Amino acid sequence: MKRILIMMICLAGSLKGFSQAQPDQTYSFSINEAINYAYEHKDSVVNAGLDVKSADFKVKETVGQGLPQINGTASFQDYLKIPTTLLPGEFFGQPAGTFIPVKFGVKYQSNLSLSATQLLFDPSYIVGLQGRATYKELYNRAYTRSKIEVAVNVTKAYYQVLVSNEQIKLLDANIKQLKQQMDQTAAQNKQGFVEKIDVDRITVQYNNLITTRENTVRLLALNYQLLKFQMGMPIEYNLTLKDGLSDVDLNEDVAATVADTSFYRNRIEYGLTETNLKLSEFDLKRQKAQFLPKLSANASLSESYQDNSFSNLYSNSFPSSYIGLTLNIPIFNGFQRANQVKQSQITVQKNQNNLNSLKNSLTLQANRAKITYINGLQSLNNQKRNQELAREVLRISKIKYEQGVGSSIEVTQAQTALEDADNKYIQGLYDALVSKVDLDKAYGRIQ
């Protein structure tokens, strides 16, 4: 009985640990919720956030260079053999030209010192302080860029899942009506009204649709995994989607021309390039500041201990201290500073050129995205009409065939045309959704 009780306690503890180790792995997200989840879990965003924190510490490190720099040192020497110095013999009444060996010092020596320096004037340091806000801005904008890229990737992956679900619905509808038609044709064949080849044609189409659906279901599972990957979610977690295709606003108003012609300033790429230009300008100022003198104050306090007996070493001390100023005036260094300034000037010019070129590039991207989106909408609407027409042609073909004025080949061709129209509609739907995301990104609407 005691053994059974111990086993039950151990089993209960194991189950408790297992339940604690298995978190709730089922999630249901809208697009916005999926994006917010990715902001917290996607490695690229998390690392960009860590870079922002690292930049804060880098700024504090720069500020710390202007604070007092205090260092303490301690030393101990045991002279196993005290250094010997030769003194002229005439000092001790010996003949000229002779030397007397004399040992100076004691066996044990120890020094304790405290030194401090304070920067009073350094143009390079002043420029560094001026550029610290711009330096932090660079990493904040890089963090925003990572979030935008993740938002775009998650949205596209989310849409891919929605489109795959829509494709499965269309396949299910076609399979259902084709199954009814196959059963009716098989019954008519048994009654002798239609030939066996008519049944075979429909069966081939039915089998092909079943295979297509199975392939699409497997692709849907893969699309879910891709979405979870883009979100930074473990693949083994369960995920369902709240939003549907009806929640996506697909209309030409989205592509309306932006009134503000400087919309490119909303693009994070422009902000990053602009920040790089500012940093290069600060670097140019820093290089020019190298021509100016630097002034610092310094002070030192030390205690020296000497004795031939280790036990009495710290009985007596010999203190010393000083304060002073150090002025460092650059005079000539082989034109290195001048050449460094010229290099920084070229970097500023290149960054300015990059900014001007990026402005044109972003404008071109926005125009291209707008045209692609409008074309995608027109193609999608056209595919919708073709889909309805193909469905109507199939309906009429089936009626003619049932009334004996049409052929089974005509019905088969109409069914194939409907499947082709469905596939083109699905492709057009995905293209339109992706082009909408690209359009929002091009106009800087995703932040």
Image (cartoon, rainbow, N blue to C red):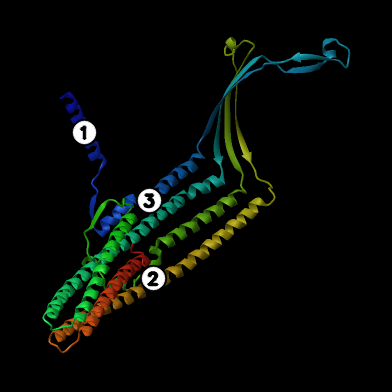
Q: Which residue is mark 1?
A: 11
Question: What amino acid does circle 1 point to?
Answer: Leu
Quadrant in which the C terminus appears:
bottom left
Rendered view: 242 above or below 65: below
Mark 1 and mark 3: Cα distance apart in space: 37 Å
Instruction: List the residue tagged with mark 2.
Output: 366
**For residue 426, which numbered disc appears in the image?**
none
Element class at badge 2? helix
Q: Is residue 91 above or below residue 438?
A: above
The numbered mark, 2 or 1, whose residue comes first in the sequence reads: 1
Residue 307: where, in percent of width, then height? 63, 12
Q: Which residue is mark 3?
A: 43
Q: Quadrant of residue 394?
A: bottom left
Q: Residue at x 27, y 51 (%)?
A: 237
Q: Is residue 252 visible?
A: no
Residue shown at 18%/82% (left/top)?
Answer: 195
Q: Amino acid at mark 2?
A: Ala
Q: Toward the viewer: 71 or 147?
A: 147
Q: Are marks 3 and 2 in contact (CB under 8 Å)?
A: no
Q: Quadrant of residue 113?
A: top right
